[in-house]
Amino acid sequence: MKNNVLKGSILVALGAGSYGMLATFVKMAYQEGFSTAEVTLSQFSLGFAGLFILSLFRKRNPGPKTEMSGITGIFKLVVAGTSMGLTSIFYYLAVKYVPVSVGIVLLMQTVWMGVILEMILYKKAPGPRKIVSVFIILIGTILATNVLNQSIKINWTGFGWGIMAALTYTATMYSSNNIALHFPPKKRSLYMILGGLVIISFVFHSSLNRGFSHEIFLRWGLLLSLFGTVVPPLLFTRGMPLIGMGLGAIIASIEIPVAVLMASIWLREPVTLLQWLGVILILFAVILMNIRKKLIDHRRGDIIPGNKAGWAGTFIKTGI
């Protein structure tokens, strides 16, 4: 049992770490002159192709067909996947204007946005633990984005794109934990990424006919699709059932310090002690929000495929 928890924890940590690398890779692609259109289209098209190939080798277990198992379920997943594509667009636009350390913190505002959405959908007031966690996240965000430093000029364009990314990411989190849960995880990821590819192609269709550099596919597309849409979902779908949603959400939050650390090392982005304190506060809030769930899962031995009543704050991802 302990070996399974350790194995699951390592798999989830590796998956979250992979996501944490993405923004740094995107910034490096920008430095080479590639555009947001080229970055997102290459990532999602190669990611879809990779998952499609992997799905061909999936063992098919015969089971009873349900009403949603056909075209309806697929359509819902594809539509839900559009929020994933929009998240990538908004997030990558954000890191074009703000440091990666700020971009990832803005994206993680989805934690408190998820609490609000949960309250609206289920007409249930959040408990004291969640309310305290939200305030801690907001304080951590103020510190991590360095807005208290009067010598730093805030780029409100990047800030706006970051908040938009958090909003669409909140929709992605809801979809990932509530829609067509009877589908195999790989197939759900495949259809959601297809939805992301569709919306990205629609948004950037003009770029395909005007100066689109196909060099991006070999230069950065393979790397982004591997770490953003292929490897992490495989690691999460293997690791999460071994440790449960509560512990999984806590471990997956490692994406935040990984993103900040990667940007600090590879991009030489300065990160102050106050910003690190803000990151630590956000991580603490995620742990506080999920620690009780982790204990309950551990006592019951539950494996939760979808967290309909308490999904806010979890980091079950399908590719950003």
Image: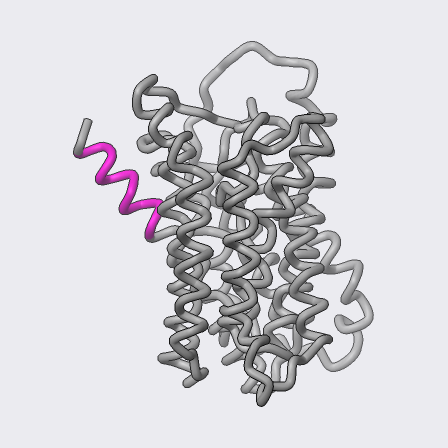
Q: Nearer the viewer, residue 29 or 177?
A: 177
Coordinates of residue 175 in the picture (x, y in percent): 64, 37
Q: Nearer the viewer, residue 277 or 245?
A: 277
From what the image shows, is residue 315 above or below residue 26? above
Whether residue 136 appears in magenta in the rendering, the answer is: no
The part of the image, by quadrant, that contains residue 125 is top right
In the image as oriented, which residue stretches furthest toward the bottom? Answer: 151
Q: Is residue 281 visible?
A: yes
Q: Is residue 191 visible?
A: no
Residue at image coords 36%, 79%: 265
Coordinates of residue 308 in the picture (x, y in percent): 58, 26
Residue at image coords 62%, 64%: 91
Coordinates of residue 314 in the picture (x, y in percent): 49, 41
In the image as oriented, which residue stretches furthest toward the right? Answer: 206
Q: Main secondary structure of the magenta part?
A: helix
The part of the image, by quadrant, that contains residue 192 is top right
Q: Determine whether, in the image, residue 206 is placed left or right of residue 85.
A: right
Q: Quadrant of the N terminus?
A: top left
Q: Nearer the viewer, residue 107 or 55?
A: 107
Coordinates of residue 53 in the picture (x, y in percent): 49, 45
Q: Nearer the viewer, residue 176 or 129?
A: 129
Q: Determine whether, in the image, residue 300 is placed left or right of residue 144.
A: left
Image color mode: one colour
Q: Determine whether, in the image, residue 120 is placed left or right of residue 108.
A: right
From what the image shows, is residue 212 above or below residue 174? below
Q: Quadrant of the C terminus?
A: bottom right
Q: Determine whether, in the image, residue 241 is placed left or right of residue 41.
A: left
Residue at image coords 45%, 58%: 19
User: Which residue range is magenta in the image?
Assistant: 3-13
From what the image shows, is residue 90 above or below residue 54? below
Residue at image coords 48%, 26%: 305
